Image (cartoon, rainbow, N blue to C red):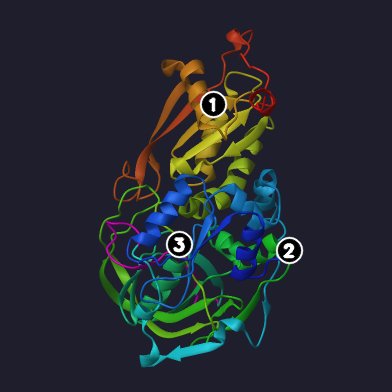
């Protein structure tokens, strides 16, 4: 561990692993970049580095964490070790370290020198309401306690120095803003773009301390931070870009829509407004983006930070849990649990535990240990061959979920479902038909 310290190291590691496409053809930041990233993800292709972006001199990288092959490169581990690494960091965080000089401040723009329109911020999907910062890590600070927090918020570019920012009600940043607004004060924030990927992973955690400690734990070394130009917020020193600003007190404007992690376009929201005070960046910087509603979006916000909690919750109820997975194709609302069950009630207890692991989890499918939870075809096979709907499906009404779930009300209240897709005890004599695998090359090459 410790060979990656910034975006450039990560891009180099992806290239060495055959997981990076360097695209020399000129691309339009309006819709074309988003379409290329989406197509690469759909075909399980590499991440993209767009060398030539129409109207700009800054390259754009995207789709960097769209699957476990790339995530494993980022964590410098095997794919099968990713969940273990994400869970271990909860018990072994590493505090960040302050530095006085940083590459993220090689170029400093303040006041009227700032123009967000000069940055190649894409308009990703055809129905998006404009250009959005989607891969930025927001750094906030509690004005009373001084505690910092890392999180993801979409940011709608509304002018050269103006952005709309959507903040969910349950975010720490929302709590910070409420305190500032109560005092009639603006809330300083910073947005770090183009960072060591563990900083992005850490931002997805719900952690009561500073998520910079999670980033350090994931990398195995302290995250280096530097103080902002216009505030006392500490930001990742090796970032490509830092946008410094403040959320204006009491100001709300329409913001959106954007392709969301649910796979739908979100609605227009009355969201807070950020006034940008400064932009700092590296010499010859790289802009990083991600598609809204992409697997990368879901991996960062739902899969990577939630699977460790899912495993802990379910294993607390049953030591027979073998593996867990929150598949990105389920938008973060689906949890899969592999269980070596000991009695007929165990799968339902495990499903209930999964629902409490995180508020987003709405549907839980529990399968036997002979079912590969990473293969959707296997999971659906179990549902169709091992589920008696009257006995094996149960609903928990009026539960708290996510407000962006189309099945929830405006506050996120919804019904949740558990499915016991394990083979009934009285049918345990049934054995799966499994054919041995062979090396097809031996048969096709003659």
Part of the protein shown in magenta: 124-145
Q: CA distance from mark 1 to mark 2?
A: 36 Å
**Relative depth, front residue between 63 and 77:** 63
Q: Is residue 133 magenta?
A: yes
> How crowded is the residue under tag 1: few (<14 C-alpha within 10 Å), some, or many (20+)?
some
Residue drawn at x 65%, y 47% as measured from the top left: 83
User: Secondary structure of the magenta portion, mostly?
Assistant: loop
> How crowded is the residue under tag 2: few (<14 C-alpha within 10 Å), some, or many (20+)?
some
Q: Secondary structure at mark 3?
A: loop
Q: CA distance from mark 1 to mark 3?
A: 36 Å
Q: CA distance from mark 3 to mark 2?
A: 26 Å
Which one is earlier in the sequence, the residue at label 1 or at label 3? 3
Q: Is residue 53 magenta?
A: no
> How crowded is the residue under tag 3: few (<14 C-alpha within 10 Å), some, or many (20+)?
some
Which one is earlier in the sequence, the residue at label 3 or at label 2? 3
The residue most toward the front is 446
Residue drawn at x 62%, y 54% as measured from the top left: 18
Q: Nearer the viewer, mark 1 or mark 3?
A: 1
- Residue occupied by mark 1: 378
- Residue occupied by mark 3: 171
Would residue 143 be visible to someone looking at this image? no
Q: Nearer the viewer, mark 3 or mark 2?
A: 2
């Amino acid at each position: 561990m410790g060979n990656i310290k910034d975006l450039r190291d990560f891009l180099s590691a992806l290239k060495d692993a055959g997981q990076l496409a360097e695209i020399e053809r000129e691309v339009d930041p309006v819709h074309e970049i988003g379409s290329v990233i989406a197509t690469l993800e759909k075909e399980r292709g590499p991440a993209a580095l767009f060398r030539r972006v129409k109207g700009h001199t800054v390259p754009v990288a995207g789709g960097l964490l769209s699957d476990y092959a790339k995530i494993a490169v980022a964590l410098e581990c095997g794919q099968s070790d990713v969940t273990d690494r994400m869970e271990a960091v909860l018990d072994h965080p590493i505090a960040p370290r302050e530095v006085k000089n940083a590459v993220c401040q090689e170029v400093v723009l303040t006041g009227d020198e700032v123009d967000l329109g000069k940055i190649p911020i894409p308009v990703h999907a055809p129905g998006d309401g404009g250009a959005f910062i989607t891969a930025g890590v927001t750094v906030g600070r509690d004005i009373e306690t001084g505690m910092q927090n890392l999180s993801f918020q979409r940011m709608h570019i509304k002018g050269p120095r103006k952005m709309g920012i959507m903040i969910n009600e349950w975010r720490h940043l929302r709590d910070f803003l409420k305190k500032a607004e109560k005092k009639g004060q603006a809330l300083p924030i910073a947005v770090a773009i183009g960072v060591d990927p563990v900083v992005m992973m850490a931002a997805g955690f719900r952690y009561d301390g500073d998520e910079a400690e999670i980033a350090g734990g994931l990398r195995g070394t302290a995250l280096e931070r530097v103080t902002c130009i216009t505030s006392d917020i500490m930001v990742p020193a090796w970032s490509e870009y830092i946008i410094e600003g403040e959320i204006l007190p009491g100001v709300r404007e329409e913001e959106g829509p954007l392709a969301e992690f649910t796979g739908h376009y979100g609605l227009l929201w009355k969201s807070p407004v950020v006034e940008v005070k400064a932009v700092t960046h590296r010499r010859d910087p790289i802009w990083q983006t991600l598609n809204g509603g992409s697997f990368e979006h879901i991996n960062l916000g739902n899969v990577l930070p939630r699977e460790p909690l899912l495993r802990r919750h379910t294993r607390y109820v049953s030591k027979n849990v073998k593996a867990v997975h929150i598949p990105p194709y389920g938008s973060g609302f689906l949890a899969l649990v592999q269980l070596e069950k000991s009695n007929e009630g165990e799968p339902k207890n495990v499903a209930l535990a999964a629902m409490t692991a995180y508020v987003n989890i709405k549907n839980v499918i529990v399968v036997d240990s002979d079912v590969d939870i990473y293969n959707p075809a296997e999971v659906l096979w179990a549902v169709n061959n091992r589920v008696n709907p009257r006995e094996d499906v149960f609903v928990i009404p009026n539960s708290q979920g996510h407000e962006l779930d189309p099945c929830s009300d405006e506050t996120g209240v919804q019904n949740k479902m558990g499915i016991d897709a394990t083979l009934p005890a009285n049918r345990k004599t049934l054995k799966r038909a499994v054919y041995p695998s062979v090396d097809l090359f031996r048969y096709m090459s003659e």
